[in-house]
Image (cartoon, rainbow, N blue to C red):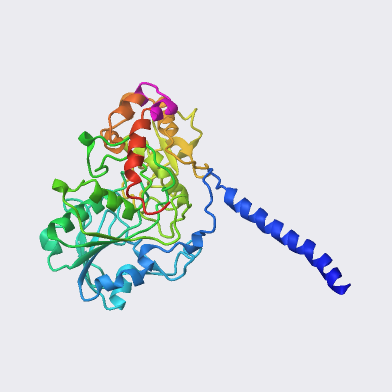
Amino acid sequence: MRLKMFKNTLFPIITAIVLVLISCGNGSKNQKTEDGRPMTEDVSLKTIKVGANQMENYLKLLEGKQVGVVGNQSSVIFKNTNQQTDHTNYTHLVDSLISLNINVKKVFSPEHGFRGTADAGEKIQDGLDPKTGLPIISLYGDNKKPKPEQLKGLDILIFDIQDVGVRFYTYISTLHYVMEACAEANIPLLILDRPNPNGHYVDGPILEKAYTSFVGMHPIPIAHGMTIGEYAKMINGEKWLKDGIQCELTVIPMANYTHDMPYSLPIKPSPNLPNDQSIALYPSLCFFEGTNVSVGRGTNKQFQVFGSPDLDKNHFNFSFTPQPNEGAKTPPQQGKMCYGEDLTQVQVTSGLNLNYVIDAYTYTADKSKFFNAFFVKLAGTKKLQEQIEKGLSEKEIKATWTKGLEDFKTTRNKYTLYR
């Protein structure tokens, strides 16, 4: 009788627990983020392990060798596995390698410098790192590609920089030139991979060869949906380096990462991308850098607002006045009242938003002064400016990108390391 009572009592409890577990499992499987992206099942953001943190997979490649590092302020090793909540508990890769008796000989720095404080486009000087005494060689300005004499004596080069997954963000152009220099000097390149915060979509016009520049070197869309490691594999595989040469490449991939994961960068990748909102808006708002419209440089809302003295203040009810600050010593429209839009609270969805530029062009005082020559370089084609000037809608413009994006995705799939 006691056994029967125990069974009768326990059975409904077990059934209830099983039903709850099934319900929770189904819920997580169907759960989506605010912008409609599927949440990954058991792969938590807390468990992402960036390439730099997996020293067990690359220290052996460095031992007994003379090492160069291409890096900046984002080249860190996290001490706490929860990178999303602990943004301060880390050591710089260079400091960590030196502490482990790895023979780091020199550092190469991209746009914004080794410590990441320089303005966009500012000339970066060679010098010495005050903490380690290592020579720092700038890879921006006149010296975008490491010279043979700068690589002399190195046995291996490490590339570890946090990217944001956008064609005109120049770290992937630096990657191209570093790979090319390594290939020519027969020096292997080790890439420590990091997440792409805009890696969940692919969008934008494909760059046309005639408009190749440092803000667009390859026939890819504006948002390419790849990590630095994947992108390096594509550069090699598609033979985009000079004369089709290929770099001896090793990528240390991340653990527990997928492209659909939202990722909050623990360290801002450059002075004017201070937070998640700015990084999410950057692919859409950077078009304004090719116009007379400010994107908030010289404010504390960089790439989260846009405005100009020439925009219709009756249509745009937000205003700001750019002033010099860190990362913007002489911001566009400095000291002038700019009328525009505040996007700090806007929910950013997947894909480029062309309506910001279209709306600004529609309500500018003098359309002949709206665009400058840099717009075509950013777009990678003349067509986008022409389409906006003709009054095409965002939907009509994006329809012209379909074939190019489909072809790119087919190529991209050959090099992806993550689902």
Left or right of 274, for residue 37: right
Q: Residue at x 44, y 35 (%)?
A: 339
The answer to which image quadrant residue 97 occupies is bottom left
Q: Is residue 153 above or below residue 369?
A: below
- List x then y, in percent, for residue 52: 35, 65
Figure check: 203 above or below 298: above
Near-viewer residue (65 or 391): 65
Work out whether 97 lies above or below 394: below
Would you identify the image quadrant in which residue 101 lies? bottom left
Q: Main secondary structure of the magenta part?
A: helix
The magenta stretch spans residue 398:
yes
Residue 55: percent from the left, percent from the top? Answer: 35, 71
229 left or right, relative to 299: left
Identify the image quadrant of the N terminus. Answer: bottom right
Quarter where residue 91 is shown: bottom left
Can the viewer see residue 160 in this picture?
yes
Residue 399 location in percent, x, y? 40, 28
Q: Which residue, as the protein is rendered here, is positioned at the far right? A: 1
Question: Relative to 242, does residue 395 appear above or below in the rendering?
Answer: above
Which stretch appears magenta? 388-399
Which is more toward the observer, 140 or 97? Answer: 97
Q: Position of residue 220 (x, y in %)?
A: 30, 40
Q: How many marks?
A: 0
Residue 70 colored in magenta in the image: no
Nearest the camera: 86 or 63?
A: 63
